[in-house]
Image: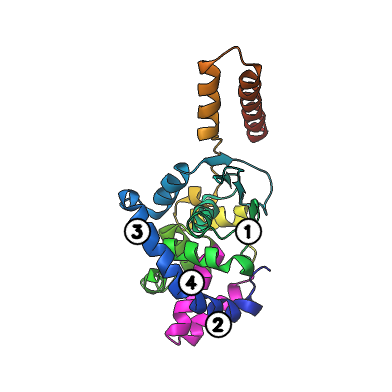
Amino acid sequence: MRITSDILEQTIVRNKEIKREIEGIINCIDIRYKTVRILSPEKQALQILKEHHLIQLPILDDDWGGAIRKLPNGKKVFVINTAQPRVYQYFIYWHEIYHLIADFEESSLHLISTEFDLRERKADYFASQMLLGSDVYEYYFKLDKTLGFIQKIMHCMDMFKAPYKAVLIQLYESAKEKENKDLMQDIKNNFDIKLDQVMLESLFKELALDVTLVQPSDIIDFGDLKVRIDEKRQSDESVEMYKDHQEFINHFKKRLEGFKSE
């Protein structure tokens, strides 16, 4: 189920119910990955995923953010769709890390949508806390009062490197706690607005913000998969299977590069 203004209140109630559990997962991150804690949130997430078999590929599907594949040996492979704007990628990094830590998925294949699904509220709430925390409310009210609501949200997206709806949900939660009904109504009035990449780029340029955040990275990186195939190939060039695997990866990469240039 996609989150709309009609179920925003229900979403906030759900967040309150799972808040303590998510705080426990965040504490686990701080302890387990303290060596990468000094990095920015998105860099920290990327580093964690790279330690756990991350593959990055541009896939031309607006509704496909990524996937988690559990292998027969119990290990997980994480796939990020780099054809999505970077702010969505950063959110999905942390969404996936929730599943890495909580081992929440029940099937061997877990698909991740770029829209927010209430069935994945725990992972989404965890991701929003890692990127936004409670600081977004305070930052919003420090912005120039001459800016319109949407312009302020663009500034929040730029500052916290988080998607539009993630910013609105977190901001609404804080506004509700502080009984700021005017802000709550502004959020509801603008929650269901569809901002495509062209519109986001235009707004970011107009406000002199980092436009690359709302653009795809189109990174092609097979990570450990390519490294291990290359190592196997070098260790025994006579094995045809290793050669076939290496040629497949190289051919697949060239095809992806071809799609990017079209």
Identify which residue is drawn at 53% across, 63% down: 123
List the residue tagged with mark 2. 185
Q: Which sits earlier in the primary sequence, circle 1 or circle 4?
A: 1
The reply to whether callout 1 and callout 4 are in contact (CB within 8 Å) is no
List the residue tagged with mark 1. 106
Instruction: Give yes or no for residue 10 being in the magenta stretch.
Output: no
Identify which residue is drawn at 45% across, 87% down: 179
Question: Which quarter of the rendering shows the N terminus?
Answer: bottom right
Q: Secondary structure at mark 4?
A: helix
Q: Where in the figure is residue 153, as x and y percent of width and height?
A: 49, 67
Q: Where in the figure is residue 71, as x and y percent of width and height?
A: 60, 43
- Give the quadrant of residue 174: bottom left
- Vertical placement of residue 84 versus 20, above or below: above
The reply to whether callout 4 and callout 3 are in contact (CB within 8 Å) is no
List the residue tagged with mark 3. 30
List the residue tagged with mark 4. 170
Q: Secondary structure at mark 1?
A: loop
- Give the quadrant of residue 233: top right
As measured in the structure, the alpha-carbon distance from the residue carrying label 4 to the one carrying label 3 is 21 Å
Of circles 4 and 2, the one toward us is 4
Q: Which sits earlier in the primary sequence, circle 1 or circle 2?
A: 1
User: Which residues make up the magenta segment?
Assistant: 164-192
Circle 1 crowding by C-alpha within 10 Å: few under 14, some 14–19, many from 20:
few
* Amino acid type indicated by mark 2: Gln
Q: Which mark is residue 49?
A: none
* Amino acid type indicated by mark 1: Glu
